[in-house]
Image (cartoon, helix red, strand yellow):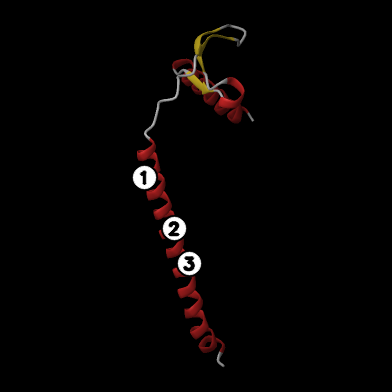
Amino acid sequence: ATHVNGIADILYNRGVRYLMTHDLNVDMPEFMFGGGRVRVQPKSIEEDGGVIVKLNFDEPQPPQPEGRLFLKRIRQIFKKKLMTSFMAAMLIIKLIKVKLMFLLPVIVGV
């Protein structure tokens, strides 16, 4: 039991060290919070186990305008590739079906 506690302490210390050296960025949802970002920056650990952090609330950036022609072309390419992959999957399924129609009687011995 003491060995497990030692491993748990080591993992806790490593996790705390990682969290103290890295900032946490959370993107807020567009429909509730307007698409802002919250940045949590840890500053120090207190003796009782508490943490002092700095919270930054970043304003959402305005959406970048996109060209309609370019976006429409990307959608067409995506649809074409999606349809091609769907047709390839259907062809493979049909080939397996035909193969089984000829091999199953041989395997069963009819």
Cα distance between the residues tagged 1 and 2: 15 Å
Q: Which residue is mark 3?
A: 90
Quick check: 74 above or below 97? above
Amino acid on which disc 3 is placed: Met
**Disc 1: CA contacts within 10 A as few (<14), some (14-19) or many (>=20):** few
Q: Are marks 1 and 3 in contact (CB under 8 Å)?
A: no
Closer-to-camera residue (100/17): 100
Q: Tell us which disc is closer to us: 2 or 3.
A: 2
**Disc 3: CA contacts within 10 A as few (<14), some (14-19) or many (>=20):** few
Cα distance between the residues tagged 2 and 3: 11 Å
Position of residue 10 measured from the top left corner of the image (x, y, whole percent): 52, 24
Amino acid on which disc 2 is placed: Met
Position of residue 110 measured from the top left corner of the image (x, y, whole percent): 57, 93
Q: Which residue is mark 2?
A: 83
Q: Tell us which disc is closer to us: 1 or 2.
A: 1
Q: Are marks 2 and 3 in contact (CB under 8 Å)?
A: no
Q: Residue furthest bottom?
A: 110
Q: Which residue is mark 1?
A: 73
Closer-to-camera residue (78/53): 78
Closer-to-camera residue (67/36): 67
Closer-to-camera residue (26/70): 70
Q: Residue furthest right?
A: 1
Residue at the (43%, 54%) spot, across then down:
82
Residue 105 position by quadrant: bottom right
Give the mark nearer the N terminus: 1 vs 2: 1
Quadrant into which the N terminus falls: top right
